[in-house]
Every structure is written in C-alpha cells, then in structure tokens.
Image (tube, rainbow, N blue to C red):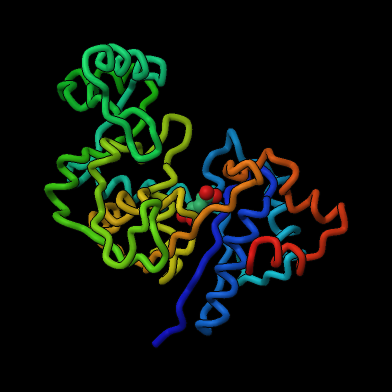
Amino acid sequence: MPPPVFRFAPSPNGYLHLGHAYSALLNADLARQAGGRLLLRIEDIDATRCRPEYEAAIYEDLRWLGMAWETPVRRQSEHFASYRAALDRLAAKGLIYPSFESRAEIARMVAERDANTPWPRDPDGASLYPGTAKRLSARERETLMASGAPYALRLDMAAALASAGDLDWTEEGAGPSGETGRVAAQPEAWGDVILARKDTPASYHLAVVLDDALQGVTDVVRGQDLFWATSVHRLLQRLLDLPAPRYRHHALLRDAAGAKLSKSTRATGLRELRVEGVTPGEVRRRIGL
Ligand code: GLU
C-alpha cells in the first residue's frame, strides 16, 4: 500500500492565525502517525486577494511552527491550463453554461423573487443563482459572447445530478450537526455553482478537486466550514472520473467571544504571537494539539 497523502492548502489572502495552525499541525500529526506524506498547496487563484507577501509569510509561519512539507509546493495560479482542460471536458458533456449577469443584476433578480416567497440559499447563506442565463437561446448566447461580454461558467446542476447519480463520502471527522461516517452528498443545495469566474478562469471547487486528484491526496483534513462544499467536490470528482479521498472536517477554533477566528483578528495571528514571545510549543498547547 502506498503511504497516505495529506495536504494543507491555505490561500495567501491574509496572515495565518491559530485556526490555520490547528489545521496545518493536525494534518502534520496525522500524516506522521500514519507514516504518510504531507504536501503544502498554495491556493492562489484569486489574483485580486492573494499577495506574494502573504505567501512568503505562510512559509515563514509554518516553518516557525516546526512543520516540514514536500517540495516543490504546488501553486494553483501556475496551473490555469489544467483547470481549463477540465472545464472543456465538462463543456463537451454539456454540463456547463456561461452566465453574463453582474453580481448586482443577480442580487436584483433574487430580491424580486424574494419579495413573494423566500428565495433558497446555499449552505454558506448565499442566494442560489436563479438560472436565468441557462434559459438563453444558443443564438442569444453567441451574440453576447461575440460582443465580448464577460461571463462566468456555471455547472448545470440538474444535468450534472442526472449524469452523476447518488453520491456520498467517508467522513472521519464530523459535520456541523455531527454528521459522520457515510455522509450523503447534497450538491443540489448549491444550485448552479460557478466553476470559472469572470476574472479568474477557475473556481475554488474546481481547482481543489483537480489538485487533490493530481497530487494523489488520500486524506483531506480541513475546517468544518468546508463540510458541505464536499458535496460539490464529490459531484465534480464523479463527473471528471477522479478518485474520492477520505475527508476529516475539524471544528473551527473560536475566540473568547465565540466568534470564528479571521485573518484580520490580530490577537490570534501567528506573527503577532511570535513577536509577543509565544513559542511554537505554547501555540500547540493553546490549540489543544
Ligand atoms: N484554500 C482553502 C482555504 O484557505 C482551503 C481549501 C481546502 O482545504 O479544501 O480556506
């Protein structure tokens, strides 16, 4: 049996805090206990939010924590061509379509519908896309594309579900309501998710699924905030013939007031703690590892 492969996959859009330290060190501990490998992946497809200084800080902070990972580190921004190739495969199966509306237009459409009956929301609380661009005729679509109008690519969820059938995953941690063991995926809860954005030719869902497969990741260990995103990941894995890793979602660390830690809360930033003289050993104790 080849050794299991774990990965920590931060986005360089801010400095790491205690919550990241927990996720990173949990991955490192589990990999070590299992005699497995540990990868670090930089999820930097969003050029508007990611910055080189945050990426440099990730390496510095993780090294300070005592973490070691295999090199070279995969940086998603260097692999848009492979994400494009996957989009082409989904397009060939008729499973994606372009959507031209701006965020403001979508918000307006949703508000109009919301006025009558509450409009459904995804597990993150965002309104589902109303599907308007899916109903454009081929002619209308061509005209818009020829005019150079920017567009996102969305998954046709109904068609994807029909092609994929029922899906589940092995959860070794727990979901927000204690879901564990075999968990039934519910990708329909996300509606026609975006797989490539207007300004970025990929999305988190697409890139994460492709990279986990390409890097041979067997164990995805990450925060519970991504628990239900796994439904979309399982769907994309099925549509693209990719293997399913095992999943372990861990509880998110909270501050004294019970709020989720964020990249802008300086009190729990690893850099701030280091400057205050906190040791990596104390970090481990604070996060209970
Ligand atoms: N890049 C994602 C984040 O920083 C994590 C992705 C994952 O672990 O699947 O939230």
In the image shown, does 188 or 154 lie closer to the viewer? 188
Residue in view at x 38 percent, y 46 percent: 84
In the image shown, does 141 or 102 lie closer to the viewer? 102
Q: Is residue 262 left or right of residue 174?
A: right
Q: Quadrant of residue 59?
A: bottom right
Which residue in the rendered view is the most extreme toward the front? 257
Residue in view at x 45 percent, y 67 percent: 215
Residue in view at x 43 percent, y 39 percent: 201
Q: Quadrant of the N terminus?
A: bottom left
> x, y percentage for residue 34?
50, 82
Disc tally is 0
> x, y percentage for residue 241?
25, 62
Q: Quadrant of the C terminus?
A: bottom right
Q: Is residue 232 above or below residue 72?
A: above
Can residue 74 be seen at all in this image of the molecule? no
Residue in view at x 40 percent, y 61 percent: 174
Can residue 271 be seen at all in this image of the molecule? yes
Q: Is residue 217 left or right of residue 31?
A: left
> x, y percentage for residue 80?
46, 47
Q: Is residue 194 above or below residue 70?
A: above
In the image shown, does 287 or 35 lie closer to the viewer? 287
Q: Quadrant of residue 115?
A: top left
> x, y percentage for residue 279?
81, 64
Q: Is residue 249 left or right of residue 167?
A: right
Q: Is residue 93 left or right of residue 26?
A: left
